Amino acid sequence: SFAKLVNPLRRRLLQLANIQPSQRVLDLGCGTGLLTMMIKRSVPKAHVTGLDGDEEVLKIARDKSRGTDIQWDHALAFDMPYPNQLFDVVVSSFVTHHLTGADKVRAFKEVHRVLRPEGWFHILDFGPPFDLLTRVQASVMSKFELTQDNFAGRILPILTEAGFGEVKEAGHIVIFFGPVSFYQAVKGA
């Protein structure tokens, strides 16, 4: 299944995010809460929030996480119900490719707003092809309109446009569905 396929990638994302106890962490587009619960298990003292625009998947997440101290919120990525500078770290796994180009810009600006200065945004999602196999995969997958920004390498420029600094691809890997990148960006002081 897709979840089994991406769990090792999510573990790598968590290594890159290097979440510390007492930090406030937002899992943006948390879905059924797999990554959110991985965060809480790996750093029990972190303040963890999962946000998703789909009330049905949040219900699954709430049911699966009974007894854990995770806050689950229903809202869209580009219209979050949080005050400015609330979070130390925002992570997002396989969400950005579901957003239109315009909504990516709006969502990334919203992430920038809710991050504290020096806060980090870590993204795991489809990325630009890096060899023959991934070029073939991307040519097939980019027929799906919303993945085009990812395969065309537009995630880093959109992060920069949203106000982030130290924007980079921290690594990439190939999975059955195509090339996947680990992106990271920091909010300036």
Image (cartoon, rainbow, N blue to C red):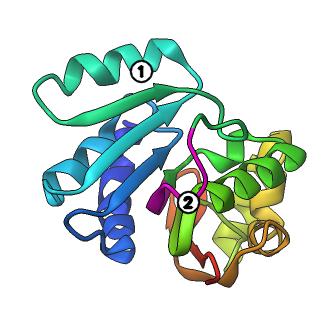
Q: CA distance from mark 2 to mark 1?
A: 24 Å
Q: Percent position (x, y) of residue 159? A: 75, 69
All told, the count of numbered labels is 2
Say which label, 2 or 1, has the lower sequence index.
Answer: 1
At a point 51% along the width and 72% down the height, the residue shown is 120
Q: Residues within 10 Å of mark 1 (few under 14, many from 20)?
A: many
Q: Which mark is residue 58?
A: 1
Q: Quadrant of the C terminus?
A: bottom right
Residue 114 percent across, percent down from the top left: 59, 55
| Res 33 quadrant in image | top left
Question: Tag 1, which secondary structure?
Answer: helix
* 114 on left or right of 79: left
Front residue of this view, candidates 158 and 149: 158
Q: Label 1 sits on what residue type?
A: Leu
Please give the range of residues in magenta. 82-91
Q: Is residue 56 visible?
A: yes
What residue lies at 41% left-to-right and 38% top-to-bottom? 50
Look at the numbered disc 2 and give the secondary structure of its residue.
Answer: loop
- Pick the residue in front: 134 or 63: 63
User: Which picture quadrant has residue 18?
Assistant: bottom left
Which quadrant, please, contains the N terminus? Answer: top left
> Which label was assigned to residue 12?
none
Residue shown at 75%/59% (left/top)? 150
Quadrant of residue 80 within the rendered picture: top right
Query: Is residue 151 shown left or right of residue 58?
Result: right
In the rendered structure, find residue 85 and report the number of the disc placed on it. 2
Answer with left or right where residue 107 lies relative to residue 32: right
- Indicate whether residue 71 is drawn in magenta: no
Compared with residue 112, is residue 44 higher up or lower down, i.e. above or below? above
What amino acid type is highlighted by mark number 2? Gln
